[in-house]
Image: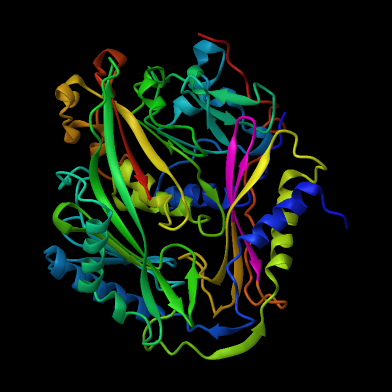
Amino acid sequence: MTIPRYAAELSERLTAMSDKPPTHVDVVELVPPTRDQVRQRVEQTLRTTAEAAGLDLAGMKTAETDARIVTRLTDGSRAVGFTASGAVAVKVNMEPFAHLFDADPGGDRLTDLARIAADEQGFSTLVPGDDELRFERLWRVKAAGADREGRHNDPVLCRAVGAFRHVTRGLPVYGRASATVELAAGGRLASLSTSLRRRAEDGSGKTIATVPVRPAGDAAQDVATRMVTAFGNPAELRGARVEPEFFRFGYLSLGRRRPQSLLAPVYIASLAVIGEHETSAHLIVASASVEAFLRIRGGGASTSTDRLAAPGGPVQQPQPA
Amino acid sequence: MALAADLTYTFNRSNGFDRELRNAGHARSFYFSDQSCWSNDLKDTGFGGDDRNFADKVDLFWIETHGSQNSSGQASLLYDTPRNDWRGVSSGWQLGEDFNAEWVMAYSCKTAQLPGIANWWNVFQGLHLYCGAWENMYDGITTDECGEDVGDNLTDGDTVSESWIDGVSDWWVDNHPIVVGPGTSAAWNGGNIQWHLTAINIDHLWGHGSVSSDLAPAQQGCMVWRWAEG
């Protein structure tokens, strides 16, 4: 099959920006948590958070569904456990504009505050001894406004979010942030989350296989081919262009509502499609082993009915008032 | 027409959002996709659209498509059919009015870029908040649960603004959520904004906390927005 020139160029650009992968990588067995273990994680996380955030646990109530375990405190704070993955999130009941920063103390200071909060929450003890939970990136939540005359106020810093990445066997486990702390002024904890596929002493970590890593160029071609399909197999891009942003190598953690039995190597491409008017942005995963151990789910399907074929014919278009 | 790439996880997000809200007891009024989703659903009835029967007939309207902002600072959404127009532009939106809309959520790139959103007065005719993006929003396996996350946040009792910003963020990929809405002159307060008076601070999904009053255009003294950047 001949791929279009734009796809070949995309493949080349992705390959050029690829991390240098190792020659072989372990496929690692995971041990999905039981519902009881998720309950325990929720309770344990809540207790640690309560101490740091001054929350009162008296009167807390828990409700469970298939997907989530939700424990609510009487002040409105809550902890959520995801039964499929064991991920946990705690949200302190705090209005969006309570405890604003007086001024942005700068990225270094905010990062320090995030690291301090992570230490207080014992993040480093959550993963096995040979693993790491590294600081990855700082986010800011800000607010601003303008009046009818177009006068703008100075933006205010509402929250800082420190995001951390789980590293196992020397490779990052990509996906949503492995852990986060959200901080208000003074380092006050507003929320935290953990989304870790391996936890200390959870019994995971057996090596299922040690597999040779596919060349980045092969995986890049997979990505390019998928973009061709997404465009509808055109020979030319007619005014659009594809900008690769990164092409990373590591493990992948699926979403918090998905069980996962192993960590397998993948390449992950981030791409922006810049059209004449619209832009779209895509994250595409390609297996980094010849045998694809991890099943990446495809897109869901619409549950919409055909509007024009609906009983009674097309929906009536009312006349303008 | 220039090419646009299909999004893969649109229905994971939109179905997840829909499911979580219905599981919490909320009713779905309509669900359209692909060639059954039309620009007139958001366009004001007075401009020849049909928002009275769709976006402006519901409390919360969720849409996912490719987006952009034109040179006038107006949002533009791309549709999969020219039945009305290929593109729906926010200069034709007037939401709230005598009808129902409180919140619009658009998982689309760049529809609410800074500083153009300061000029979105026409859109807010009683609408409380527009939840969109000031830059790119990513379609991928790490953002496929964003719809469920937003829905769960809303029904767990978070504010609408926090539900959006936290729900569409996996705190890894470069998503750029933003929430924008009008405030009163008292909220503007000469530029020393009284944030606690704004819908961004007050609004929850109906049944899950407080909701601010509709603000008619004459009551609007400022436009305020809250966003995440990394």
Percent of width and height locating residue B150:
41, 49
State left or right for residue A309 relative to residue A201. right
Closer-to-camera residue (B48/B138): B138
Q: What residue do we see at 26% from left, 18% from top? A: B220
Q: Where does the image place residue A34, in percent across and percent down from the top left?
A: 42, 81
Q: Which secondary structure dominates the residues rendered in magenta?
A: strand
Which residue is at a point 36% across and 26% down the rendered structure image?
B127
Residues rendered magenta in the picture: A270-287
Is-magenta flag for residue B35? no
Give the answer, above or below, for where A51 lies relative to A224.
Answer: below
The extreme right residue here reads A1
Task: Judge by depth and name the residue closer to the eye, A9 or B100.
Answer: A9
Tell me if residue B147 comes above or below residue A207 in the rendering: above
Residue at x 61% of width, y 30% of height: A277
Given residues A213 and B125, the one toward you in this image is: A213
Question: Farthest front residue?
Answer: A16
> Residue A19: in sight, yes or no?
yes
**Left or right: residue A51 compared with residue B101:** left
Coordinates of residue B173 in the picture (x, y in percent): 47, 55
B62 vs A141, left or right, is right
Question: Is residue B203 in sight in this rendering?
Answer: no
Residue A185 or residue A241, whichever sits in front:
A241
x then y, percent, for residue A117: 22, 66
Q: Quadrant of residue A40?
A: bottom left
Q: Tally the marks.
A: 0
* Colour scheme of the picture: rainbow
Q: Quadrant of residue A22?
A: bottom right
Instruction: Report whether B175 appears left or right of B36.
Output: left
Q: Could you say which quadrant of the image residue A191 lies in? A: bottom left
